[in-house]
Amino acid sequence: MSSPSVPSTVPAVGRRLSGWWALLGLVVGFAGLAISYALSLLLSTRDSPVQAVADLAIRLTPGPLVEWAVRALGFLDKPLLIAGILLILAVLFALSGVLARASVVHGLVVYLAIAAVGFAALSTRSGFGYGELLPLAGGAVTWCVLLPWLSRALSGGQPLVGGAEGPAADVALSRRTFLGRASLVTAGVVVATVAGRWVGGARRSVEEARRLLRLDGVSKPAVPDRVRIGVDGVSPWQTPTDDFYLVHANYSLPAIEPKDWQLRIHGMVSQERTYTYSDLVDRDLTESWITLSCVSNPVGGDLIGNAWWSGVRVADLLAEAGVLPGADAVLQTSDTGWTCGTPLEAMTDDRNAMLAVAMNGEPLTIEHGFPVRTVVPGLYGYVSACKWVVDFEVTRFADITAYWTERGWSELGPVKIASRIDVPGDGDTVASGEYVAAGVAWLQHIGISGVEVSLDEGQWQQAELAGLPKLRRKSGEAGSPGRPNRDTWVQWRAALRVEPGDHELRVRAIDVEGNPQTGDLAEPAPDGATGWHTVSFTAE
Ligand SMILES: Nc1nc2c(c(=O)[nH]1)N[C@H]1C(S)=C(S)[C@@H](COP(=O)(O)O)O[C@H]1N2
Ligand SMILES: [Mo]
């Protein structure tokens, strides 16, 4: 497979041949880049690997140098940086092609070293998810496949140089084979790039449609003062949309323009209904603070967020369709094909189960379900919070399965009572003496009545709770009058005396009947984790 090295007696031929091998390296290299670029567009990852490397370069460049560049060029333009990176890559690709002439393995080493830089760039970014590695992996696989394949063509399984007639004819033949294969690769690359851009373009037009939306019924309230406990380091009561956790069982995000969106309500109803996006937003919108959490959240984990949601009450739409007796579930289906089964009761009782069109006063982001997703207070997301929702089938639990129940998770997913210590962080060092710990606690739609902490397995001590938002209630809207809105998490704080040394702090919430949260440890599967969050810290 590999060819003998060039005899020094034929330097001219050797140089000419090197040109062919450099070309081979370039074709292989750019094919891999194009595949990774197309994949990143198809999968809607944040950036292609090359863009991530540009980010890394910016991060690694000392601040003063960046400032200098900005001043000298008038801008620090990413396209310019990317052009520079592509140039360096081109040189490396050509080099690896030349190396591949002696041995394909030598060439591959260079490609894999480049992939390693891409990996470093991607994996060190904040908010990194493994899905972002797929484009890089696609590019690396492309290199690993194409380099041997094209090398075999160019070396033709024959010695590459020689004055004799035979080998020279072979060289011509192998070049033809090589050019044939290289053209094929180039054509494939063009197709992949066009497909990627086409999908990427669909996403861009959805972003544009989203940006132009004006939703009259959507408000953007300030965070009420009373809900803040006033300790630095505690998670913000309102989670900014960009920091709101993301969970979805698909890598590529659907691109749905509002004008193309529809929700079909069918099944056990007296009249099948279809709603368009404008049907929804032209109605009176309901709005409330709702904390959404994930069943996969481990004890002390951060798969939970609190936002201001605006949407249409599901109960109203189901009433219009007329639910038939005997139904107990709504099978929700997303545009991605993901499904969840939600208790009909939670969709129709006085809680604000809604088809949300906005989050924190802005149209939903694509990641969080644009244009429409469901939010049901009190239930874990996996049984209720369908993003990109397009279909409601009113049905019976006995007749359905859904995405996660098919994978062993429970059919019903009411949120479990839980609490978390945000301050101190695990492993923190704090000043000894008076110390104020703080965190959050939740049991959506039921509420908690207290939080307690215990230092070094000592007596449980009551923490102080922040207030809850006041309910603004229109007639006929959620909740019985006078009852506080318990659909959100609650911040707490506890003043402690800490002696110098190592400590352990644990927390538990108390439910509305006065029962403390259990200390029994349970894994998230199949219906939510239990146990007390415990952090270790040192006082000095
Ligand atoms: N279409 C779709 N909707 C989905 C999911 C999904 O995988 N696909 N995951 C669910 C889960 S498990 C949770 S916890 C919430 C998370 O919503 P978020 O990503 O907006 O925080 O969405 C739910 N809705
Ligand atoms: Mo979840």
Image (spheres, grey):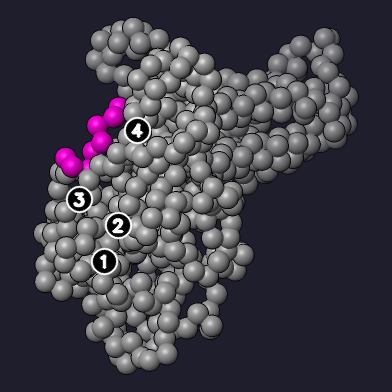
Which residue is located at x 33 percent, y 73 percent? 347
Left of 334 or right of it: where is 2?
Answer: right
What residue is shown with label 1?
A: 352
Q: In the rendered view of the protein, which quadrant contains the N terminus?
A: top right
**In the image, the residue with mark 2 has its CB under 8 Å from the nearest atom of ligand 1:** no
Which residue is located at x 74 percent, y 40 percent? 149
User: Judging from the image, what secondary structure is the residue with disc 3 in?
Assistant: loop
Which residue is located at x 49 percent, y 40 percent? 533
Categorize mark 4 by other alpha carbons within 10 Å: few (<14), some (14-19), many (20+): some
Is 65 located above or below residue 341 in the figure?
above
User: Per the image, is 232 magenta?
Assistant: yes
Is 205 located above or below residue 22 in the figure?
below
What residue is shown with label 2?
A: 487
- Which badge, 2 or 4, comes first in the chain's sequence? 2
- Which badge, 2 or 1, comes first in the chain's sequence? 1
The magenta stretch spans which residues?
225-234
What residue is shown with label 3?
A: 469
Is 201 located above or below residue 429 in the figure?
below
User: Judging from the image, what secondary structure is the residue with disc 4 in?
Assistant: strand
Residue 254, given in percent of the width and then of the height, sits at 41, 58
Left of 159 or right of it: where is 497?
Answer: left
Q: Nearer the viewer, residue 215 or 295?
A: 295
Q: Splitting the image into 4 quarters, where does residue 320 fall?
A: bottom left
Instruction: Give the label on residue 322, or none.
Output: none
Is 492 located above or below residue 81 in the figure?
below
User: Judging from the image, what secondary structure is the residue with disc 2 in?
Assistant: loop
Q: What's the distance in space between the residues labelled 2 and 1, CA to CA?
A: 9 Å
What residue is shown with label 4?
A: 494
